[in-house]
Image (tube, helix red, strand yellow):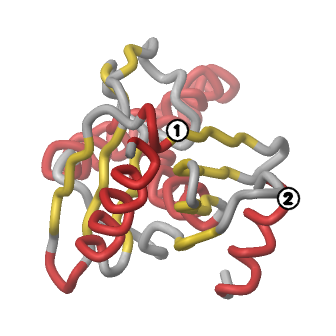
Amino acid sequence: MEPSDITAALGPELARDEELLWSGQPRQGVRLRATDIFMIPFSILWGGFAIFWTVAVTRSDGWVGLLGLPFLIIGLFGIFGRFYWDSATRRRTVYGVTSQRLIIIRRGRRLAMSSTNLDQLGSLELKERSHGRATILFGPITITPLGSQPGLSFSQRSQAQRPQFDSIEDGRRVFELIRDAASQRTE
């Protein structure tokens, strides 16, 4: 998404006296995560067995092989679909830091927006990665039921969730910008 599109997505959500200090998106494209060390072999085994079983049973018993289709679909999602889903979710996600709050917008069939006021920010955590990318976690930890967090694949289903700017460029600069803006709000 172009920077002007990101700003345009945030514009309608800003209050009249609110100034946009920074906007961005998570890293785009296919992204491997730590959980993939387990999930890739597991999904290949699951999907491979589902393909083998469905083909073998369909050849011998015809329609009975259709009973394996749900397992086949789950296996194919685990092998391929979860990467597409994660990438598509990140492509529709926009982050903003304003003079008053932090904003996360996820566009899709419905617009989902969450914001955290800077004067009620609570904890702020920076997790730096290579090439200046970082994840910034903020606000209180909330407990959500497994699988209820939009955009998370079944390999990332954590019960404890915190709002975050995931894998953003120049993360340390954004972290310091948030810290400075929050300290100005609390003065």
Say which of 115 and 25 sits in front. Answer: 115
Task: Tell me if label 1 and label 2 are in contact, CB under 8 Å.
Answer: no
Say which of 100 and 148 sits in front. Answer: 100
For the N terminus, which image quadrant? bottom right
Can you identify the residue that label 1 sits on? Answer: 116
For the C terminus, which image quadrant? top left
Is residue 119 placed above or below 130 in the rendered structure?
above
Q: Quadrant of residue 61?
A: top right
Q: Residue at x 58, y 60 (%)?
A: 98
Q: Is residue 89 visible?
A: yes
Q: What amino acid is at disc 1?
A: Thr
Q: Which mark is residue 35?
A: none
Which secondary structure, mark 1?
Answer: strand
As measured in the structure, the alpha-carbon distance from the residue carrying label 1 to the one carrying label 2 is 17 Å
x, y percentage for residue 44? 29, 49
Mark 1, residues whose alpha carbon is within 10 Å: few (<14), some, or many (≥20)?
Answer: some
- For this view, does 179 lie left or right of residue 65? left
Q: Which residue is drawn at 52% across and 29% down?
A: 149
Kindly give the residue lying farthest to the front in the view shown.
187
Q: Which residue is drawn at 54% across and 43% down?
A: 151
Can you identify the residue that label 2 sits on? Answer: 12
x, y percentage for residue 20? 63, 69
Say which of 138 and 157 sits in front. Answer: 138
